[in-house]
Amino acid sequence: MLTVVLALVALQLGSLISPAYACGCGAMVPGRQAQMAVRQETSVVAWNGRTEQIVMRFTVDGNAPEAAWIMPVPSRAEVELGDRAVFDELYEVTAPVHRERRYFWPRSHDWPFGSDSDSAADGAMPGAPAPDAAAGVGVVGRERLGDFDVARLTATDPDALREWLEENGFELPPGLAQELQPYVDQKWEYVAVRLAPQEKGSGVVLRGTLDPLRLSFASDRLIYPMRLSRRAKVAQDLQLYVLAPHRMEPRGSIGGDEPEVTYAGKVSSYGRLSTLTGGGATFLTALEQSFPEPGRIDGDHELRAADEDATFQRVIWEEELLTVAGAPAWLLTVGGAAAALAAALVLRARARRRAPVPSPAR
């Protein structure tokens, strides 16, 4: 019994710590001697062919009062707090539809085998960067947005970028400079975010669902940065909502499992989503992808228009036993057939009794 209990406890603990949720920043790192896990990260990407917006929302657990992450962007970015209601609308739009499907023959939970009560309910801006003390790093801007300390940076040297981040309170994973080199080579810019509650020193920790952040930048390609997620130590799951003129699909799996489409359809001036789409008709594609071995991630997601704007929505079938006037149809059918057979036998027996008996031959 002790062995079984310990095994069950280990299984439950494993389900809590794995998998983690993919963050385009690679990892959300808490301060020293603190623990934090990103329980869920959901991103919405809106793109009209010229401008891209990324709205990210984190749900975290742990005892860390502060944490930091960095997001590479292909051009100058503007950052502001996002709207929580956007995610509620996305969940509403993409939720599976429930449909009924009836079956004829009884199953294990139906009478006479069992009782219904026993069944289980089966997503380039103007402005020149200001000079900074660290050579190779330019500070475009630094703002306080709620519990976020946001720095918008340029860099020509990944080591100088790492040093600036460390000197300014952005504690990030070791080896970050090596992973940033491809972005430096492409002259990308960076949004560094430090999650720090304003009630500093009051015992407030980062826990629960944080306010979303909204990044906007010019881009002629729809890109979702993922390369830095290769530094994650546990399996990663990506949930991505894409708003674009057409149904979108990743150009490749970038080292993870094949992406799965969980929703595809048009949305037109749908409530809060219109703040991202500009109020016009837009195609929404919802994607899920797993990265069992994050170290194999070899690039960023670039999405392209699919061959056709085929729609898709998940369906949950509610299966019920077919009934007629409250009675199981199979029982009525079997009972009716039995009654008809019995009646036929009775009629046959009566016919035999009434048939004349032939006289014996002489």
Image: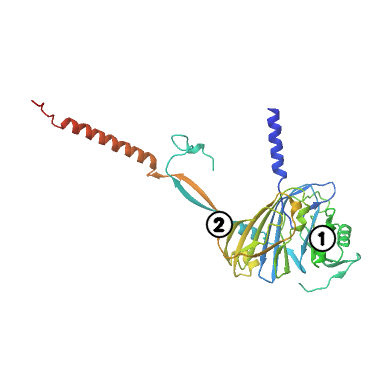
| Rendered location of residue 105, percent (x, y) | 43, 41
Task: Report the amino acid beneath label 1.
Answer: Leu
Residue position for label 2:
313
Image quadrant containing the N terminus: top right
Residue position for label 1:
180
Q: Quadrant of residue 87?
A: bottom right
Please give the name of the residue rendered at 70% of the width and 36% of the height, measured from the top-left corner: 9
- Answer with mark 2 or mark 1, whichever residue precedes in sequence: 1
In the displayed structure, would residue 303 be above or below residue 125?
above
| Rendered location of residue 3, percent (x, y) | 70, 29
Please give the name of the residue rendered at 87% of the width and 64% of the height, measured from the top-left corner: 157
Seen from the viewer's position, the closer of residues 56 and 156 is: 156
Q: Quadrant of residue 270?
A: bottom right
Q: In which quarter of the image is residue 246?
A: bottom right
For the residues carrying marks 2 and 1, which lies nearer the camera in this image?
1
Q: Identify the disc placed on residue 62.
A: none
Seen from the viewer's position, the closer of residues 205 and 347 is: 347
**SS at mark 2?**
strand
Seen from the viewer's position, the closer of residues 91 and 50 is: 50
| Rendered location of residue 211, percent (x, y) | 72, 57
Q: Distance between the residues labelled 2 and 1?
A: 38 Å
Seen from the viewer's position, the closer of residues 143 and 280 is: 280
